[in-house]
Image (spheres, rainbow, N blue to C red):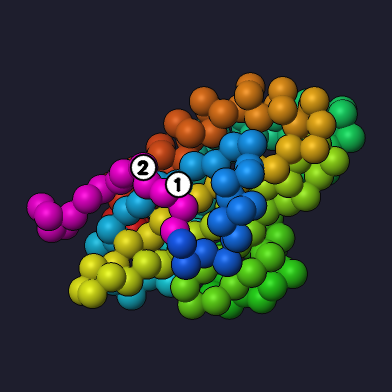
Amino acid sequence: MSSQRVLLSECRHPQQSVLMPEVVHAAYYRDSYRVEPAHRELTVSDAFHAIFMHRPTWMKFIMLGRNYLVSLFGVVVPAKAEIMHPRMRSDYQVGEKIGAWPIFYLSSEELVAGRDNSHLDFRLSIVRVEEGQAISIVVSTVCLVHNWFGRGYTQLIRPFHRWGVKYLIRRAILAGRL
């Protein structure tokens, strides 16, 4: 690893994202984190795999518990197998799932996955940003809420989400996947 590499920093949602700026700015919740990958050839799907497909078992169990609780309120949740044993592939298309989430957009520069539900719609965007010789990966979450349950859920989960995403990114860096 280069000593000049910025491991992880909070940033703005990238302007080149397909998620429209007015949607991002109107979101009830949004966050973005930038990392300079050690592997310059990393694709957006590779970055997703590196970060989200290697969750520790304790985190998977927490997600299963969360899924059980919110399913009691009619929220559509991923299957247990999608959490416990996510399938990695080398090739994806829009409409297929990557991990537990349907893909809404996919190009060489960006992957947008997420889920639409009655309480909120969320998008996870992974953008590959090339600025001269520098390459960064920006991981963003955007949540649009629809009702009181979505607002309450987002308020409750926000600190865990922020910590969890940063934890997974740092873990991917330390493991040499990113």
Q: Is residue 176 left or right of residue 15?
A: left
Q: For residue 106, which quarter of the picture?
A: bottom right
Q: Which residue is mark 2?
A: 10
Q: Residue furthest front?
A: 22
Q: Residue furthest left?
A: 3
- Drawn side of residue 177 relative to residue 92, left or right: left
State how far apart marks 2 and 1 are (Cα). Answer: 6 Å
Magenta residue check for 114: no
Residue 161 in the image: state x and y as whole percent: 54, 33
Q: Are marks 2 and 1 in contact (CB under 8 Å)?
A: yes
Residue visible at 73% across and 46% down in the picture: 121
Q: Which residue is mark 1?
A: 32
Viewer-proximal residue among 146 and 25: 25
Give, as a single range, the part of the protein colored magenta: 1-14
Dot 2 alpha-carbon crowd within 10 angstroms: few under 14, some 14 to 19, many 20 or more: some
Task: Bin the neighbour count of mark 1 within 10 Å (Cα to Cα): few under 14, some 14-19, many 20 and up.
Answer: many
On the image, which quarter does residue 72 sit in?
Answer: top right
Q: Quadrant of the N terminus?
A: bottom left
Q: Secondary structure at mark 1?
A: strand
Q: Is residue 22 visible?
A: yes
Query: Is residue 139 among what the camera can see?
Result: no
Residue 56 x/y as whole percent: 49, 39
Up the image or down, 91 lies above or below 54; here it is below
**Image location of residue 32, percent across then percent down:** 45, 47
